[in-house]
Image (spheres, rainbow, N blue to C red):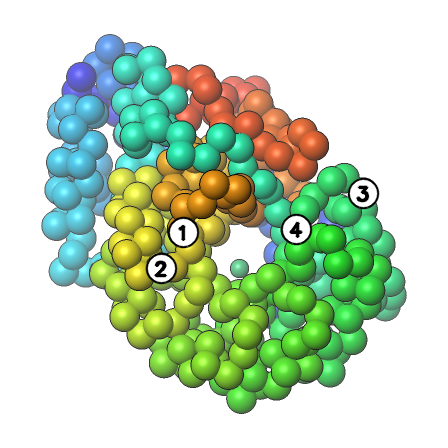
């Protein structure tokens, strides 16, 4: 089942409502996908996280080395790409290119085997997934606090059991907004905060102290992802669980997080950290350190379907009879590249997501929409 064609595709959506977080504003959404086709005409889709042009360049770099390889030998392909890039790219967007190709090969493998990817990974250890709403970004609107409260109440009404909000506006404003949201949604909905590494250790400690009575489910990326020791020092000073890893790569990078006791929750992005192949290994390693895994997920339906299969297969940590369902991140910002370009739509039923049962990833590409959104 030889790989005969590897086609990177860049898609773009101009956002009607720009939004920002602690680092920058999003006005457009631009993503590099990859379509891989075998000699029998079976194809799979993958996606890379990060700057689309650079992901595309990475895919083009790998293409001559893996064209002609057997698509079913996906770990062999992975190893080939890894060794070809190791000397130049132990971190970063090159690995998003590797991840995109890996995800597409899992899609192909599932289609050839006529099995959903979760089954190829070893089966469903979790019957359902509990999505949480990622939203509550910042906008230039003068009524930001009331807008955030209204948005959080909408997610609660829609049945979400968890809501993640952005922080990073400074300790005073963050405390005011998080307090307002918690008061509005009550105690039965989990509330997570994410600063996207906006703070120093000292500031992060101050924020944890200010929010200590608000039952925060986790504090994500409190400090720079480079500062593994700052993470662990923060963990020593707060009861709020600490999460991170969306900017981390490969099992070697995650080993740093684990050996430094940096996080309670690891958040590898399947489309950046090394694909489904590598994140399964990262998850196994996390389990040996007693660290929970809740992948970072963002992008088109390809990334989200990949996440659902992997989450279905995650080990419970620890196992128990009344096992809580695993979380999955479901971004709520405007996203036609997920909702129009790909399907079937990912819609919670009674606050839960079903695991996809179609062969491969189970994600479908809307070819007409692809013509509309394609820019490269
Ligand atoms: Mg985050």
Find the residue positioned furthest to the bottom.
202
> Rounded to the nearest whole Å, what is the CA distance between mark 3 and mark 1?
31 Å
SS for tag 2?
A: loop
Residue pointed to by mark 1: 318
Circle 4 Cα neighbour tier, 10 Å, few/some/many (<14 / 14–19 / ≥20)? many
Question: Which residue occupies 39% across, 17% down?
Answer: 359
Residue pointed to by mark 3: 157
Question: Which residue occupies 32% across, 21% down?
Answer: 110
Between label 3 and label 1, give the one nearer the viewer: 1
Q: Is residue 303 visible?
A: no
> Rounded to the nearest whole Å, what is the CA distance between mark 1 and mark 2?
8 Å
- Where residue 65 appears, x then y in whole percent? 14, 38
Residue pointed to by mark 4: 162
Cβ atoms at labels 1 and 2 below 8 Å apart: yes
- Where residue 192 appears, x then y in whole percent? 62, 61
Sequence order check, earlier mark of 3 and 2: 3
> Rounded to the nearest whole Å, what is the CA distance between mark 3 and mark 2?
34 Å
Residue pointed to by mark 2: 290
Q: Nearer the viewer, residue 147 or 60?
A: 147
| The image quarter in which residue 217 lies | bottom right
SS for tag 4?
A: strand
Between label 3 and label 2, give the one nearer the viewer: 2
């Amino acid at each position: 089942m030889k790989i005969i064609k590897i086609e990177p595709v860049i898609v773009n959506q101009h956002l009607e409502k720009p939004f920002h977080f602690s680092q920058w504003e999003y006005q457009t959404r631009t993503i590099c996908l990859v379509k891989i086709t075998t000699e029998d005409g079976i194809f799979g889709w993958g996606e890379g996280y990060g700057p689309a042009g650079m992901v595309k360049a990475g895919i083009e770099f790998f293409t001559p080395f893996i064209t002609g390889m057997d698509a079913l030998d996906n770990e062999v392909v992975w190893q080939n790409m890894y060794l070809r890039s190791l000397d130049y790219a132990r971190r970063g967007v090159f690995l998003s290119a590797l991840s995109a190709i890996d995800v597409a090969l899992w899609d192909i493998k599932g289609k050839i085997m006529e099995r959903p990817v979760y089954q190829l990974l070893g089966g469903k250890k979790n019957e359902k997934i509990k999505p949480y709403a990622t939203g509550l970004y910042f906008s230039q609107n003068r009524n930001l606090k009331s807008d955030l409260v209204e948005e959080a109440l909408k997610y609660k009404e829609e049945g979400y059991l968890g809501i993640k909000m952005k922080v990073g506006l400074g300790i005073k404003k963050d405390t005011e907004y998080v307090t307002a949201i918690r008061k509005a949604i009550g105690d039965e909905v989990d509330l997570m905060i994410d600063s996207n590494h906006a703070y120093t250790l000292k500031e992060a400690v101050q924020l944890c102290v200010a929010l200590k009575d608000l039952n925060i489910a986790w504090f994500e990326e409190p400090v720079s992802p480079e500062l593994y020791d700052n993470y662990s020092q923060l963990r020593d000073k707060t009861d709020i669980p600490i999460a991170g890893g969306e900017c981390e790569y490969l099992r070697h990078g995650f080993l740093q997080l684990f050996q430094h006791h940096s996080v309670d929750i690891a958040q590898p992005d399947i489309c950046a950290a090394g694909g489904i192949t590598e994140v399964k290994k990262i998850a196994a390693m996390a389990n040996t350190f007693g660290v929970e895994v809740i992948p970072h997920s963002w992008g088109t339906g390809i990334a989200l379907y990949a996440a659902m299969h992997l989450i279905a297969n995650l080990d419970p940590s620890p196992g128990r009879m009344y096992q809580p369902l695993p979380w999955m991140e479901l971004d709520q910002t405007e996203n036609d590249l997920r909702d129009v370009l790909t399907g079937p739509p990912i819609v919670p039923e009674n606050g839960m997501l079903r695991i996809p049962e179609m062969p491969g990833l189970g994600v479908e590409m809307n070819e007409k929409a692809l013509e509309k959104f394609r820019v490269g």
